Image (spheres, helix red, strand yellow):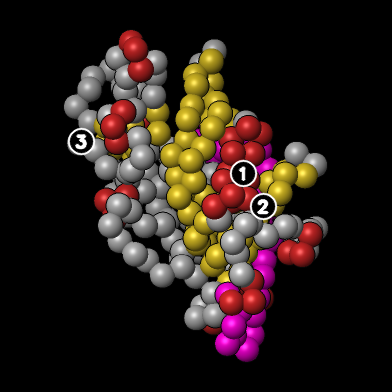
């Protein structure tokens, strides 16, 4: 099953319409780049292809994060087990964000060393991104609502990969019930499809033991996203 929310490169808003986060030096980022490129990505709240409903508040939290701290962007996602200790060179620097007309917009500077990515974007061969991170969810009336989101990166994905909707954001998601009544937090390895349990102490990373809890909905045990 695929996890995705609508997103695409947009021309509705120019990069200069989005303020830069504190401490960002655009001139330094573009220094020595003979062919600089900035992009804007648009993300709309709503239901994912998995059936999870992304609330505006979840996207607003990502916007606020980028406004304060920025984010890196990679070609595809890191493996969850590599997140704590791997330094993967970014191909895009997400340096600003705004919330406008019930949509999230993210401003990115493509790195000087990512000449192939620039060509692919300009040619329309790459125009899909995936927000990678840790969602906070609540199940109400049988429906799953994503209420908050801690982003780790906004990454580029291949064009129209099988199983993916065109121009979408594909996200790693986790399942949880009430912590005080037997918490089950789960994350699915996007590369292997393996579902893992995550304790409260592991909320800040993507590690965990293989889930041994019972009574977990079957549909959440077999989720696999190939990025």
Q: Is 37 within the magenta? A: yes
Q: Which mark is residue 97?
A: 2
The correct choice, above or below, for 13 with respect to 202 in the image is: below
State the residue position of label 3: 210
The CA span between labels 3 and 2 is 36 Å
Give the distance between the C-alpha atoms of the residues marked 3 and 1, in whole angstroms.
33 Å
Find residue 91 and report its horizontal and vertical position in percent.
50, 70
Residue located beneath label 1 in the image:
64
Could you tell me which residue is drawn at 29 percent across and 36 percent down? 202
Q: Dot 3 lies on which element? A: loop
Q: Nearer the viewer, mark 3 or mark 1?
A: 1
170 left or right, relative to 26: left
For the question of whether residue 58 can be seen, the reply is yes
Range covered by the magenta-colored residues? 29-52
Q: Residue furthest top?
A: 181
Residue at point 47% right, 30% down?
A: 136
In the rendered image, the quadrant that contains the C terminus is bottom left
Q: Position of residue 26 (x, y in %)?
A: 64, 71
Which residue lies at the image location 59% right of the left edge and 49% below the top edge? 68
**Observer-nearest of 147 and 98:** 98
> Are discs 1 and 2 less than 8 Å apart at CB?
yes
Relative image position of residue 61 (x, y in whole percent): 59, 39
Label 1: few (<14), some (14–19) or many (≥20) C-alpha neighbours in 10 Å: some
Q: Nearer the viewer, residue 5 or 56?
A: 56
Would you identify the image quadrant in which residue 148 lies?
top right
Give the quadrant of the N terminus: top left
Where disc 1 sits, the SS reads helix
């Amino acid at each position: 099953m695929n996890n995705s929310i609508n997103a695409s490169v947009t021309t509705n808003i120019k990069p200069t319409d989005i303020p830069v986060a504190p401490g960002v030096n655009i001139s330094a980022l573009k220094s020595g780049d003979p062919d600089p490129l900035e992009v804007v990505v648009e993300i709309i709240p709503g239901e994912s292809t998995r059936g999870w409903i992304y609330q505006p508040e979840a996207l607003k939290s990502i916007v606020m994060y980028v406004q304060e701290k920025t984010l890196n962007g990679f070609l595809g996602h890191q493996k969850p087990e590599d997140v704590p200790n791997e330094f993967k060179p970014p191909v895009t620097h997400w340096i600003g964000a705004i919330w406008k007309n019930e949509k999230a917009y993210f401003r990115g500077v493509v790195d000087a060393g990512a000449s192939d990515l620039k060509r692919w974007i300009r040619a329309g061969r790459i125009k899909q991104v995936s927000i990678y991170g840790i969602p906070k969810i609540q199940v109400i009336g049988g429906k799953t609502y994503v209420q908050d989101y801690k982003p780790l990166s906004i990454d580029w994905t291949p064009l129209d990969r099988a199983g993916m909707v065109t121009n979408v954001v594909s996200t790693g998601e986790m399942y949880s019930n009430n912590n005080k009544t037997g918490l089950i937090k789960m994350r699915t390895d996007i590369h292997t499809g393996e579902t893992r349990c995550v304790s409260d102490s592991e909320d800040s990373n993507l590690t965990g033991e293989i889930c041994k809890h019972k009574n977990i909905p079957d549909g959440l045990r077999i989720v696999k996203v190939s990025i």
